Image (cartoon, rainbow, N blue to C red):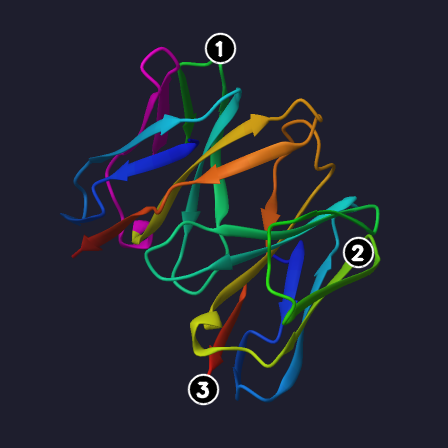
Amino acid sequence: KNQVEQSPQSLIILEGKNCTLQCNYTVSPFSNLRWYKQDTGRGPVSLTIMTFSENTKSNGRYTATLDADTKQSSLHITASQLSDSASYICVVSAVMNTGFQKLVFGTGTRLLVSP
Amino acid sequence: ETGVTQTPRHLVMGMTNKKSLKCEQHLGHNAMYWYKQSAKKPLELMFVYNFKEQTENNSVPSRFSPECPNSSHLFLHLHTLQPEDSALYLCASSQDPRGAYEQYFGPGTRLTVT
């Protein structure tokens, strides 16, 4: 069964600290893995997209890693800011034999950055 | 931020009402999507449209009726909803539903069914 599991479910950190969010998946055939940031009451916004051959990708203070062998990904946030408070959603894309992509969403990690 | 817009942003409706959600994308994309996001659950894909044609319906109850008059506009018509239909409804668009194109999301409509 195609699944994406994220941990922790929620996290509170102090402003300026680093944190790492985890994502494990059982999705095939794997096409790419995406991390989205979703502010409360808003739509998700893409942070990174990684294909099978990419191990790491950065977007400012956000760095995503991918281990396709163990089917794990992480999102590392450096020097957190109050504006980082949001839900972070891991999404794995599979391309079906029809050519259409199927996105499998995790439930997200809710991050609160405290002053 | 303004690539995909949704109206209204908030909607409260009774179970016997009929209302419509509207989505518009300004990105020149060919594919549009409706998702439902309930608390503590993953986003659920509801419908996919490609060049105005519905390509996917994920066993969505008939009280939800989508309409795609052109590649830029997508509607979700609602009637006789249930309280469990209360959720954030997200619209998204992508260049193509095939391959691995990025999906761009709108801000969502927060729906409350009373």
Q: CA distance from mark 3 to mark 2?
A: 31 Å
Residue A71 among magenta residues: yes
Q: Is residue A112 magenta?
A: no
Q: Quadrant of the C terminus of chain B?
A: bottom left
SS under mark 3: loop
Give residue A115's quadrant in the image: bottom left
Q: Is residue A60 visible?
A: no
Image point (53%, 89%), residue name: B14
Label 1–label 3 contact, CB within 8 A: no
Q: Residue A56: percent from the left, percent from the top? A: 39, 18
Q: Is residue B13 above or below residue A78?
A: below
The answer for how far apart the CA atoms under marks 2 and 1 are is 34 Å
* Residue name at image x 47 percent, y 61 percent: A42
Looking at the image, residue B61 sits to the left or right of residue B30; the answer is left
Residue ID for mark 1: A53
Q: Chain of mark 1?
A: A
The front one of B20 and A87 is: B20
- Give the secondary structure at mark 2: loop
B113 is higher (above) or lower (below) than A100? below
Task: List x then y, in percent, for residue B91.
Answer: 61, 57
Magenta span = A60-84
Question: For the residues carrying marks 3 and 2, which lies nearer the camera in this image?
Answer: 3
- Decide: is A25 above or below A70: below
Q: Which mark is residue B72?
A: 2
**Disc 3 marks which residue?**
B114
**Quadrant placement of the N terminus of chain B:** bottom right
Residue flagged by tag 3: what amino acid is it?
Answer: Thr
The chain to which mark 3 is attached is B
Q: Residue at x 68, y 31 (%)?
A: A100
Mark 1 packing: few (<14 Cα in 10 Å), some, or many (20+)?
few
